[in-house]
Amino acid sequence: MNGAESLIRTALDAGVNVCFANPGTTEMPLVAALDAADGMRAVLGLFEGVCTGAADGYARMAGRPALTLTHLGPGFANGIANLHNARRAHSPIVNLIGDHAIWHLQADAPLTADIESLARPVSAWVRKTASPGAAASDIAEAIAAAGRTPGAIATLIVPADCQWSDAAGPAPLPAIAAPRAVAAAAIRAAAELLRRHGAKCALFMGAAALGERGLEAASRIAARTNCRLLCETFPARVERGGALPAVEKLPYFPEQAIEALTPLEAFVLAGAAAPVAFFGYPNTPSMLIPAGRAITTLAGHADDPAGALEALADELGASAAVPAAAPATRPPRPSGALNPATIGAAIAALMPAEAIVMDEAATTGLPFFTASLGAPRHTYLALTGGAIGQGLPCATGAAVACPDRKVIAFQADGSGMYTLQALWTQARERLDVTTLICNNRRYRILQVELARAGITEPGRKAKSLTSLANPEIDWSRLAAGMGVPAVRVETAEDLVKQLELALAERGPNLIEMLI
């Protein structure tokens, strides 16, 4: 057994059985080891940002890490943007990066790079394997580091000679600590704020607080105290619909967020940090919670937010029974022009039970979250770190993790162009993903930001830098060229018809919506 084989065997023994890969010469022993390992699924991405984004989507839905395999420093650098997003989502991921043979590094070959420096900003754990015999124990420690609550990115750099040289067998996985129990004092402090402020208090939630257990406990707390239930603007994962309680999403633009939070007097943070503006604007504070409000942290990212909410509900004397959610209905099937409201209504009206919606629709996607309150049970994923190009890969990874669930990639056209190679992977792997492309032929969010900056009449160059016309991008033809069946629609009626057909079929397909 060589170092690469011992490494892959160790990963399999630890329950890590998917690798999203774009390998090169220095990873050939790892490719051979993947080939020889029964039970390890190897998924090719044609761009490293697809591999890292898919690992993020997989981790969010599977609750365990996948491997990524990339080629030296430049290959890994291509995947960093979606690792930035994954870090914000607290997704467990283990990156494998091949490096030159240790004795070859001194030659300073063209692809030599400082991989450790590239990896540290997006990794909680970084190591370079020093010998073939260390490869197995190194990957075991990487998997353990990634699996610690709330999830982290671990990066292991494996020189080529450490892959091809002889090594011993697999290594055992180190023990992974359970989530920290929340202190009784934190529970009492949260209960006191809720008792004192009632309807003027908000539970501001993220991470596992937005899973089924956390939401059911939050529903008990809200029934007891009349508090508001809020979540992050871009949550990593939210369970929604059916009998689950409705949770308000904090608006994106800081003025709207401040307006929404100003009537409140107190905030209990559960699995989320206090919200801040995405960007700094003139005469606008970074902190979105107005000054003078009472804030207490019930559970941080490394804690057990769901367990903390259950303990808080008990502390408040809330009924053990989860309150029945108010009856909610789907919106009617829309008609007329395609716009954000009719598109959001169409998805909410037709999406099947247990669907997974990955939302990177930007400005077009804003009405969907509210429109889908009455939809059947589903999972909602969002763009966590703001680095666009996450949507298509994240949907791809979610489909690998949950092959029995329909995945809907709700995607803006501009950000979709960053990682459109994910469509090819969906076709090759026959993944059940329906992609809805919002083709407004512009970076609409940048046009909004220009107006917010006081530039109401942008000049020729500013207009050019926010337009995706001249030439216009034909998404239906791009998708077909990558093996994904595609149609183009121009009215809400056509969207309803084509979406109904797409959701009834298994496998990848794409609907291009001309807005």
Image (spheres, rainbow, N blue to C red):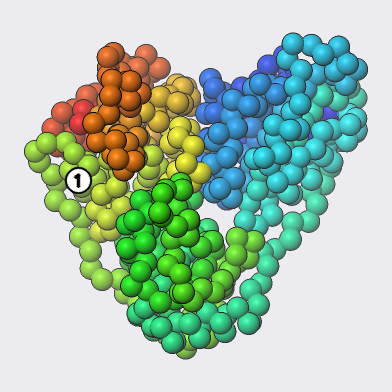
User: Which residue is found at the position 51% from the left and 44% from the top?
Assistant: 385
Residue 44, image x and y in percent?
56, 23
The image shows residue 141 at horizontal and vertical percentages of 79, 45
Please report the residue visible at 20 percent of the width from the left and 60 percent of the height from the top.
Answer: 329
Q: Is residue 36 visible?
A: no
Crowding at dot 1, Cα within 10 Å, few <14 / some 14-19 / many 20+, comes out as: some
Quick one: which residue is furthest to the left in this view?
Answer: 336
Secondary structure found at label 1 = helix
Label 1 is placed on what type of residue? Ala
Circle 1 sits on which residue? 341
Task: Depth check: give the residue in front, 241 or 38.
Answer: 241
Quarter the N terminus occupies = top right
How many numbered dots are placed on residues in this image?
A: 1
**Position of residue 47 in the picture relative to residue 122 (left or right):** left
**Residue at 49% from the left image edge and 50% from the top image edge:** 236
Q: Is residue 119 above or below residue 46?
A: below
Q: Of residues 433 and 302, which is closer to you in this image?
A: 302
Asked if residue 101 shows in the view, the reply is yes
Quarter of the figure with the C terminus: top left
The percent position of residue 148, horizontal first and vertical second, equals: 69, 54
Residue 270 locus on image (x, y percent):
52, 67
Q: Nearer the viewer, residue 381 or 406?
A: 381
Where is 216 relative to 479, above or below? below
Residue 321 falls in image quadrant: bottom left
Q: Is residue 206 left or right of residue 241?
A: right
Residue at the (74%, 28%) spot, across then down: 115
Q: Is residue 34 left or right of residue 287?
A: right
